Amino acid sequence: MKQSKNTPNNESRLDRRGFLKSSSAFAGSAAALGSLSIERGAFAQADDTVKVALVGCGGRGSGAADQALSTSGDVKLVAMADAFQDRMDGSQKGLERKHGIKAQVKEENKFVGFDAYKNAIEMADVAVLATPPGFRPIHFAEAIKQGKHVFMEKPVAVDGKGVRQVLAAAQEAKKKNLKVGVGLQRHHQLGYQEVIKRIQDGAIGDIVSARAYWNGGGVWVRDRKSFEQRAGRKLTEMEYQMRNWYYFVWLCGDHIDEQHIHNLDVINWVKGTHPQSCQGLGGREVRNGIDHGEIFDHHAVEYKYPDGSYMFSQCRHIRGCWNSVSEHVQGTKGRAAVSGPHALFSNEGKQTWRFPGGGKNPYQQEHDDLFDAIRNDKPYNEAFYGAHSTLTAVMGRMATYSGKMITADEALNSNENTMPEVLGWEAAPPTLPDEDGRYAIPIPGKTRFA
């Protein structure tokens, strides 16, 4: 397999409808993208087989590739890319076990390293982008530059600069008639579609407020000590943070962005727009281990929409607490359980409608819809609402980290740039540990955003 010059020399076999007004920075980015040539044509209807490249071979990337290969018609996984060889090899073996020849990727079409994505994208009609989200803007921009259709996982960025890059690339994709799917799969889930249609048709009157939750016990943590024991050597700081990516803002955006975006996006969908400002609080109550990086374990954010209504948002990664992953809307005539059971109620509490059930797995449905659009040349570009729901999460993080009121324009036009200046295994990530191996934590009232 082909390795990038950024690959560690002694790599171990380890697991690893409203839009904001365009800013001047967004306009400049769009102009720059518009000047880029298409390096290789996207899928042509005369072809029989849609060729797929997987960029980012972790669990979600492998799942997305599985769903792409499960769409109707001829489809073939032709290239793969990941920062870590073991992640890519494990993914490919699993996909081949399920899909056989459709997932047999030649060794020379498997690329490793920070710049591996360019080579993989070049070989395909459709790029599946599923690395840690900090890389999403540059990978999406490259795919659109090369004239490829895209499925990219949520969130699509971790800061305002990244959102601007995605919006610029989304505009360029629209010009080039490229199809773009985003992994906010609730948009493809029948129960959500049916209840939101009724809300938007006025079934519960004018929307007064909304609530959105992703409260649970949290996700995995990959500790440095175990990785180094298995590797038989010290990891560079870049390697460690890439392996334990969920706990660093430049890679993950914090769990309000990486996970809670689903719930925030649902309320934006209901409202047909996105919040204009927010304020909130958050911190670290129990997530304080040496491998917990720099992110918070709880956020509570109050978002204000242009019509004056509010969304009250919570996300929490603390075990033993009240848990809920759900969305709720209150109207002047009643209320809605937007998530399951996907039901409507009067203000007196009487159920007036309930989703009867049915529909395909939304993770599969979103790929079916995207590939149908590609094969039949239907308009399809989810990048715009994906970018603005990402911005909703980013501005919430900025509000909880700083303790300040943050507007959507401030978040979009922020000079915050979380990405490293150089991407390489020996390069320094944006945040480094102190002598005890701990990272600086944002402090409300002191943390500032330019």
Image (tube, rainbow, N blue to C red):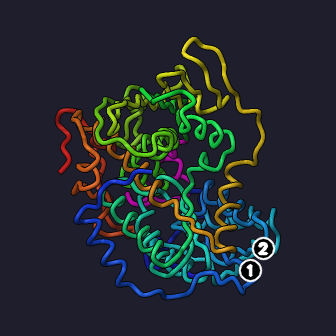
Whole-percent x, y for residue 194 in the image: 65, 40
Residue 271 versus residue 243: which sits nearer the camera?
A: 271
Whole-percent x, y for residue 130 in the image: 55, 61
Residue linked to disc 1: 49
The disc placed on residue 217 is none
Q: Which residue is at a point 56% across and 34% down the rendered structure image?
A: 199
Q: Secondary structure at mark 2?
A: helix
The disc placed on residue 102 is 2
Q: Secondary structure at mark 1?
A: strand
Q: Which residue is at a point 61% across and 64% down the rendered structure image?
A: 86
Residue 310 versus residue 417: which sits nearer the camera?
A: 310
Whole-percent x, y for residue 361 in the image: 73, 48
Q: Amino acid at mark 1?
A: Thr
Question: Which is in the foreground here, disc 2 or disc 1?
Answer: 1
Q: Is residue 339 above or below residue 60?
A: above
Q: Which residues are magenta?
A: 220-240
Q: Amino acid at mark 2?
A: Lys
Q: Which residue is at a point 29% across and 54% down the rendered structure image?
A: 412
Left or right: where 26 falls relative to 327: left
Residue 24 versus residue 296: which sits nearer the camera?
A: 24
Q: Earlier in the sequence, mark 2 or mark 1?
A: 1
Is 424 a magenta residue? no
Q: Quadrant of the N terminus?
A: bottom right
Whole-percent x, y for residue 358 in the image: 78, 40
Cα separation between marks 2 and 1: 10 Å
Is 239 a magenta residue? yes
Left or right: where 193 falls relative to 390: right
Neighbours of disc 1 within 10 Å: few (<14), some (14-19), many (20+): some
Q: Is residue 197 above or below residue 167?
A: above
Q: Which of the 4 quarters of the picture holds residue 79?
A: bottom right
